[in-house]
Amino acid sequence: MRMVDLIEKKRDGKALTREEIRFIIDGYVGGEIKDYQMSAWAMAVFYQGMNAEETAELTLAMAESGEQLDLSTLEGKFVDKHSTGGVGDKTTLILAPMVAACGVPVAKMSGRGLGHTGGTIDKLSSIPGFQVELERASFLSQVERIGLAVMSQSGNLVPADKKLYALRDVTATVDSIPLIASSIMSKKIAAGAQGIVLDVKYGSGAFMKDLNAARTLAEAMVQIGNSLGRRTVALLSDMEQPLGRAVGNSLEVLEAIDTLQGQGPADLVEVCLELGAWMLVAGEKAPNAAAGIEVVREALESGAAWEKFLELVKVQGGDVQAVQEKRLAVSAERVPFPAPQAGYVQKVDARTVGNLAMVLGAGRETKESAIDLGAGVIVRKKAGKWVEAGETLLELYSADEKKMAAGLSLAREAVTLGAEPPEHKPLIAEVIL
Ligand code: URA
């Protein structure tokens, strides 16, 4: 087989076979296929697409390109959840203990934040002592013991994706549905998922800016998962404005604690209950989402999810007392951003708030940037609320004066006020099965 022939075949819009896709992925990871040929192939896929079988084969070939987690020995069906990334998205911190408290094992490998979106591992790092780097064996034995473990993504999981994603990033081939879908799903499958619940976000703060694009991606991923024997469900959820009120690492953990104690903001609670319900369905612990919602709600309201979260913190070396007393490092410098006039909040732009949190020090501009776990933003008024002139719209947290000044100037672009209330949109637009 020659790579040049496979590039030509895809360029001409023909479907590649399983063997051909394996040849490409194995050859690329092994170094026999060079970046220039892989770039041409990625561009051919960008223009010609891939059919469902090709996309599933590509996913499997990538998933099998490195280490894989075997979770088949765990009691219960292991269900993974993936969010395509957003602003203020702290759902994993709530969902993981909530679902584990319902008997679905959670073995979560998470990432760090980049750009305007945050990452679960950074958030957990704001709990004093919490260990995010676990050995594979202790990660698994912890899941066996307490039904829940969260660790930083392992270095050798899906090396094909790492290499191909870096190449796509510099060859204008990221925005291809089969390439995005296989990239995301290969990581879930390599991490051992037997069921997968996807939170595909759409809107200004999301990877997919509009609902139609999010639906197309969700359908591709659901098809891949189901065709590979993993029960897969996708929710399309709104990311026009941040989820909940807090954006920034310690601030988000504090909001997650409030939520686990029954005091969470309504939008965050709704997304967590819906995702949790579908995780129970995918994990065969509930016959349908309506029944699942009742079970996860009970776990939240009874305090079982909160107790499970404390157990996770304890087992992974975190300071339980600090969590119970909500003593996390938050920047001492807090500056309110007031409403310049009275009106209805039309929009709190998620992308701008994400950038604002990054400017204040909470997020990374590049993979190498250092972050301030105590920095961030609290959104005091969300879309639909009436505010008087001078009322606080946002609260900015930063330890650095210059960053605070830059933040205050960006804050002006984050909130739009108007005379009429905005049109109400559902938080979860659709469920794709
Ligand atoms: N996220 C991923 O993991 N992969 C992509 O290709 C795009 C977004």
Image (cartoon, helix red, strand yellow):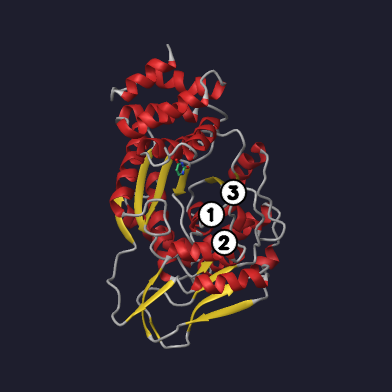
Where, by quadrant of the figure, is residue 319 drawn?
A: bottom right
Q: Is residue 397 visible?
A: no
| 155 relative to 92 in the view: left or right | right
In space, the residues marked 3 and 1 are separated at their CA atoms by 22 Å
Rendered location of residue 134, percent (x, y): 67, 43
| 58 relative to 124 in the view: left or right | left
Q: Between tags 3 and 2, which lies in front?
A: 2
Type of amino acid under label 2: Met
Which residue, given by chain and number where applicable, does mark 2 sit on?
A: 358
Q: Residue 290 versus residue 243: which sits nearer the camera? A: 243
Image quadrant in which the C terminus is located: top left
Residue 263 vs 216, above or below: the answer is below
- Residue found at x 28% / y 70%: 424
Disc with the residue nearer the chain's start (1 vs 2): 1
Rendered location of residue 399, percent (x, y): 68, 70
Type of amino acid under label 1: Gly
Are dots 3 and 2 in contact, CB under 8 Å? no
Q: Residues within 10 Å of mark 1 (few under 14, many from 20)?
A: some
| Dot 1: element | loop
- Label disc, if present, on residue 129 of the rendered structure: none
Which residue, given by chain and number where applicable, does mark 1 sit on?
A: 115
Type of amino acid under label 3: Val
